[in-house]
Structures are given as structure tokens and as C-alpha cells.
Amino acid sequence: MDSPKFDVIIAGCGPTGALLAAELRLHDVRVLLLEKETEPVSLVRIVSLHIRSIELMAMRGLLDRLLEHGRRRPAAGFFAAIAKPAPQGLDSAHAYLLGIPQPVIVRLLEDHAIRLGAQVRRGCAVAGFEQDDDGVTVELAGGQQLRSRYLVGCDGARSTVRKLLGVGFPGEPSRNDTLMGEMEVGVPPEEIAAKVTSIRERPQRFWLRPFGEAVYSVVVPAEGVSDRAEPPTLDDFRHQLRTIAGTDFGVHSPRWLSRFGDATRLAESYRVGRVLLAGDAAHIHPPIGGQGLNLGVQDAVNLGWKLAARVRGWAPDTLLDTYQAERHPVAEDVLDNTRAQTELLSTGPGPRAVRRLLTELMDFDEVNRHLLEKITATGIRYDFGEGPDLLGRRLPDIDVQHGRLYGLLHRGRGLLLDRTARLTAGGWSDRVDHLADPTAALDVPCVLLRPDGHVAWIGDDQRDLDDHLARWFGPPAGIA
């Protein structure tokens, strides 16, 4: 059989697929993005980047471009919309929420991937595939066949790749529908804030949140209006607002309107042979807390360097297996916290009592911090074995010589941050950068960072370091 023309084909050019393509191109992997839609998404929906995703964008040098098009908001009030301020001293240089139009982030990430050398083909849908020991043959809807070493399904909740792969997608079907949209309002912000505050005493799926220039995000229950098969209308929103708040706030000029359910599902496996899943193709949940896009882009950064290492030939045997081992439990936790938030927004006496109790508990800094770290993904600790608490966690964007840490991670390589100035990356210097910096803002002698910014090793012994370099980055150069 002919050699594959591509190393990796990615189905789906949304944020997850585009960022994955860029991560692969940082390591010269030949990438093709297939997108079934002929034109980029035009729905002007505001999506939110949480702290960890903002950090990842800073790691790849993308954050300044995103900040030009986004709007910062305080990092608070995420969990079930319980209005509590953020705890003091959040461990991040990027402790805010970034609201950004969905078409903008998709375009910026796609442009980033293309600049790095990824190919994009629009109007191309995956219709089938077959894999063997050497690669994957992908058949497009028009009958054309393409050959690749790997295929990744980033093609959304109704993923064709996942269905063709035969991977189970267990979970709960949708029970409650919700209307969500962005529109202008015709009353002063103070009036809206007062009314929303009073209604918040009767928890339910309802909010109005400002996005600037008199534009608000509006969420209301869908029960009793329109049919699930029909797109919602502005009159549906007006009706529900009057029912809940006694006023429709003069809403007009909608940017977009949508209806979503609370289906919650998680793929049984993220990988079968040479075919993998990421983003919504691997997990779906209600958008409570705004975690969906974030979970997907974090999948992409976790997977990208590992799949590239496999393609480039230096990956340890078990490296690609760590993608599911690390990311599947994270998705399970996100699904559970969205289930909990959904219950806390219910109007029954039991959920309302639990909500009141949790509201009191969140006055304790430890509780508030724990829940915020869940939503923002800054509390993730991958299981790298026994060691200090920092092991397996992401390292914040600390001060280093001549700048900040994340500025050293733009190329998607590992990094040895060495306060002793006695260690070396040695035969791994083609994959791992080395900064000897006694002034780095660390409480430990040295750390080895993976390309996703998680701490893979802590210590000051060269032999121990070499063992961990081999664990994560394969054999040193020149050794088969």
C-alpha cells in the first residue's frame, strides 16, 4: 500500500480540531483538517475561556490576539450561578474570564494552524474509514479516499467518527430544554441587576449577563414555548422573561438564539487503534459553568504533543495511552459538576435547600476556591505517581529571567527549569529546552515541564531526571 500522504487527518475544524492541528504542526506533523461545512461558522455567539484555557493560549503565544477581540470579566459566580466573589490570591497570572465571539476564536485558531502549515478542506465530510497496522484509509462523502497514519474525530456531539468507530456513548438523555441567546435590552443596567438579584432568590435556569454595548446573554427555561424541532424566536424569550421576571426587559435585536438540552454523555474510549476522539465527540454536557469549549481545547493540548511524538518516532510505548488515562477522568468530573449544578438550579424544595446550604458553605474560602478550581480546570492533578503536591499539576505563569514562564513554551516543547544551574537536558535537547535560572519563582530546586505545562518531575538529581526524561520524552537522541 502507498505511504500515507498525511500523518494525521482531523475531522472537524472547530476550536478543538484547529488547536490540535496547530499543536501537531509545532512538531512538523503533516496535518489535514476536514470540515463538512463549506463556510466558517457565522453564529455570533459569545463563548467563555476559563483560566486554564487562557493559560494554554498564553503558552502558545495566542493570548494577545484573543484579548484584542475579547472582554474580560471577574473570575467569580461560575458554580450554579451562585454569586460569590472569587477567593483571594488565585494562583494564576490570568485570573479572569475571557468572553469572545465564537466565530472569532474559531477563525484565530484556524489561522494559527494554517500559518503553521496545516491544510484545511471545507465541504468535506467523513463517510467511512478503515484502519490497519500502518494507518487509516478515510473515505469522504464524495467517494474520495485519503490515507493517513492517524485519524482524530473532533466532529462534535453527533460525531460521525465516533459512531463509525463503534465507541459507546453512555449517559443520560436530555430531560430539560433551555433557551439561550444574546440580544440587546431596552432598560437601564441598574434595573436589570436589581430584578435579576431578586429572582436569584428563587433559583431556576435564568440569567441576564451583560456583554457590553447593551448586549446581554439571556437564559430562560424552554418549557411551554415552541417545539424542540423548531428554532426559538425572540417572542419565545419575551414570553419566558415576562413569566419569570414580570417584564421582558425590552429585549430586541438578537445576535443569535438557540435551544439546548441537558444530555450528559461520555465516550467509553478515547482511542481505538489509530483513531482517537477529542472535544464534544468524546463528551457532552449542559453548558452550565461554560466548560464545554474549555474541556475540548484542553484535550487538544494534552493530545497534540503525545500524538506528534508517536508520529515522529520518539514516543515511549505508553505515552499515547496517557491521553485517555488523564483526560477521561477530567471529563467525568466535569460531567458530574454540571449534573450537580443542574440540580442546584432546580426549583424543588430539596434542591433549593441544598443550594442555600452550599451558598453558606461557599463563604468558606476553601470551599469557594475548590469549586472555582473545578470550573476553571486549575485544580487538575494528573496521577504521575508519588511525589510533592505540585507533581502532576500545571505550573502557573511565574516570573523567570527576562520575562514569564509561558513565553518559553510557544514551541510546544518540554522545559527543564533549573534553579541549581547544575542539570542538563542532555540527549533530549531536541525535544526539551533548558533554562538555568536561580531567580525563578519556584519553591523547589528544579522542575521538568511537559509541553502542556504540567510538572512531570521535581528534584535536583541528574540520574533521576534522566529517568523521567526517558519516561516522557523517549530515548535520548542517537539511541534506538
Image (cartoon, rainbow, N blue to C red):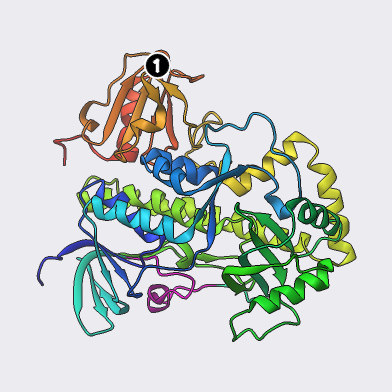
The quarter of the displayed image where residue 231 is located: bottom right
The residue lying at 42 percent from left, 44 percent from top is 57
Residue 176 visible in the snapshot? no
Residue 251 in the image, given as x and y percentages of width and height: 69, 67
Q: Is residue 426 above or below residue 61?
A: above
Residue 67 in the image, given as x and y percentages of width and height: 46, 43
The residue lying at 20 percent from left, 57 percent from top is 30
Number of residue marks: 1
The residue lying at 31 percent from left, 28 percent from top is 466
Q: Which residues are magenta?
A: 152-169
Residue 275 in the image, given as x and y percentages of width and height: 33, 66
Which of the two residues, 382 or 480, is positioned nearer the viewer here? 382
Q: Is residue 23 above or below residue 172?
A: above
The N terminus: image quadrant: bottom left
Q: Is residue 200 above or below residue 405?
A: below
Q: Is residue 456 magenta?
A: no
Q: Is residue 162 above or below residue 208?
A: below
